[in-house]
Image (cartoon, rainbow, N blue to C red):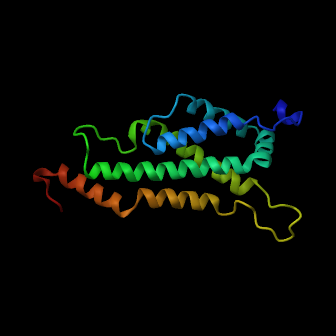
């Protein structure tokens, strides 16, 4: 809040963006995210709770935030598809983790990603100098949700779920 008041916001969020991008890369490889993921998420979430700070961050660093949203979407889709392949043919019996060792982090990350996509879409205005300008992030939240839904409901996902259901039934037969 003080950085906004003194107009010294430039670069304040850079460390958070770097940590979030690094965490997205690790989670996308189905690895555990570094412990600083929670801290970086907390910093951004705290900044966005204050309307004045949120507006200043969105005004100055919207593109960095979009890069973070895109990185986490890509990471989830990649981790999910690799996990589905593993479900179909487990490399190590008894050790099945669809989203890898960072699975417990995904619920918070996905909530964060969707909230930030909504902020970008609905709070970043079109440039005033363009008379009929379209908001720069129009449709972002629908695109993010569509991308995530497509990954989670893909044909390989349905096939893997059917195989798991069949193996859980007595005799392992399909319906």
Q: Is residue 129 above or below residue 32?
A: below
Q: What is the x, y in percent for residue 24?
A: 54, 43
Q: In which quadrant will I find the N terminus?
A: top right
Q: What is the x, y in percent for residue 80?
A: 41, 50
Q: Is residue 126 above or below residue 168?
A: below
Taking the view exactly as shown, the residue that stands out farthest to the left is 171
Taking the view exactly as shown, the residue that stands out farthest to the bottom is 132
Q: Is residue 174 above or below residue 14?
A: below
* Image-quadrant location for residue 157: bottom left
The answer to whether residue 45 is visible is: no
Count of marks overlaid on the render: 0
Q: Residue at x 65, y 53 (%)?
A: 118
Q: Residue at x 14, y 53 (%)?
A: 172
Q: Residue at x 44, y 58 (%)?
A: 151
Q: What is the x, y in percent for residue 134?
A: 76, 67
Q: What is the x, y in percent for residue 141?
A: 61, 57
Of residues 25 and 9, the one drawn nearer to the viewer in this rendering: 25
Q: Residue at x 39, y 40 (%)?
A: 100
The answer to whether residue 99 is visible is: yes
Q: Is residue 102 left or right of residue 23?
A: left
Q: In which quadrant will I find the C terminus?
A: bottom left
Q: Is residue 101 left or right of residue 165?
A: right
Q: Is residue 5 left or right of residue 32?
A: right
């Amino acid at each position: 809040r003080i950085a906004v008041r003194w107009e010294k916001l430039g670069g304040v969020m850079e460390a958070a963006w770097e940590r979030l991008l690094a965490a997205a890369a690790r989670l996308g490889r189905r690895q555990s995210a570094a412990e600083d993921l929670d801290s970086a998420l907390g910093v951004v979430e705290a900044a966005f709770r204050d309307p004045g700070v949120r507006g200043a961050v969105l005004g100055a660093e919207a593109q960095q935030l979009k890069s973070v949203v895109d990185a986490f979407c890509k990471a989830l889709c990649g981790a999910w598809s690799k996990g589905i392949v593993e479900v179909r043919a487990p490399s190590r019996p008894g050790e099945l983790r669809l989203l890898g060792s960072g699975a417990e982090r995904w619920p918070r990350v996905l909530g964060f990603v969707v909230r930030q996509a909504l902020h970008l879409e609905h709070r970043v205005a079109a440039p005033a100098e363009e008379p009929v300008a379209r908001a720069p992030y129009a449709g972002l939240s629908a695109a993010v949700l569509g991308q995530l839904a497509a990954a989670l409901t893909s044909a390989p996902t349905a096939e893997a779920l059917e195989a798991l259901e069949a193996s859980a039934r007595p005799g392992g037969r399909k319906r």
